[in-house]
């Protein structure tokens, strides 16, 4: 589904695949590719990959993901760019 960035919280909340007109998108088919992730976030993503049922991407980097077993979200705190920081703020609306 195509949505505007400011309305991306709706498919995030429902864990539905989406794309914005920009670089924010979400999928229920996570990839092992970790983009710009490093440190704790990269380890968390890789170690718990099998438990992730939805991932939100900014460009090609996972910036938030949902754990199916615990029904909770992990939001990356690392900063990558001004745009990705805006994406991380938008995600909060969908997961809180």
Image (tube, helix red, strand yellow):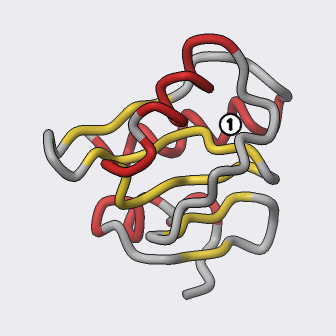
Name the image quarter holding residue 96: top left
Q: Nearer the viewer, residue 23 or 27?
A: 27
Q: Residues within 10 Å of mark 1 (few under 14, many from 20)?
A: few
The total of numbered circles placed on residues is: 1
- Residue furthest top in the image: 39
Q: Position of residue 14 (x, y in %)?
A: 28, 68
Q: Quadrant of residue 2?
A: bottom right
5 lies left or right of 23: left
- 22 or 52: which is nearer to us? 52
Work out whether 19 lies above or below 62: below
Determine whether 78 is above or below 15 in the image.
above
User: Taking 43 as reference, is 9 left or right?
Assistant: left
Which residue is pictured at 64% across the width and 64% down the height? 25
- Residue that sits furthest to the left in the current view: 70
Residue at 38% from the left image edge and 67% from the top image edge: 10
Q: Secondary structure at mark 1?
A: helix
Q: Is residue 11 above or below residue 82?
A: below
Q: Residue at x 38, y 44 (%)?
A: 93
Q: Look at mark 1 in the image and give the residue it sits on.
A: 86
Q: Position of residue 72 (x, y in %)?
A: 22, 39
Vertical order, 39 against 87 (above or below): above
Q: Position of residue 16 (x, y in %)?
A: 39, 75
Q: Residue at x 85, y 28 (%)?
A: 81
């Amino acid at each position: 589904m195509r949505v505007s960035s400011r309305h991306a919280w709706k498919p995030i909340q429902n864990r539905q695949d989406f794309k914005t007109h920009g670089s924010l998108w979400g999928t229920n088919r996570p990839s092992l590719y970790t983009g710009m992730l490093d440190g704790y976030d990269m380890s968390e993503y890789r170690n718990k990959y099998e438990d992730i049922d939805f991932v939100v991407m900014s460009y090609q980097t996972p910036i938030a993901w949902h754990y199916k077993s615990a029904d909770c979200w992990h939001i990356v705190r690392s900063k990558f760019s001004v745009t990705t920081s805006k994406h991380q703020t938008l995600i909060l609306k969908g997961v809180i």
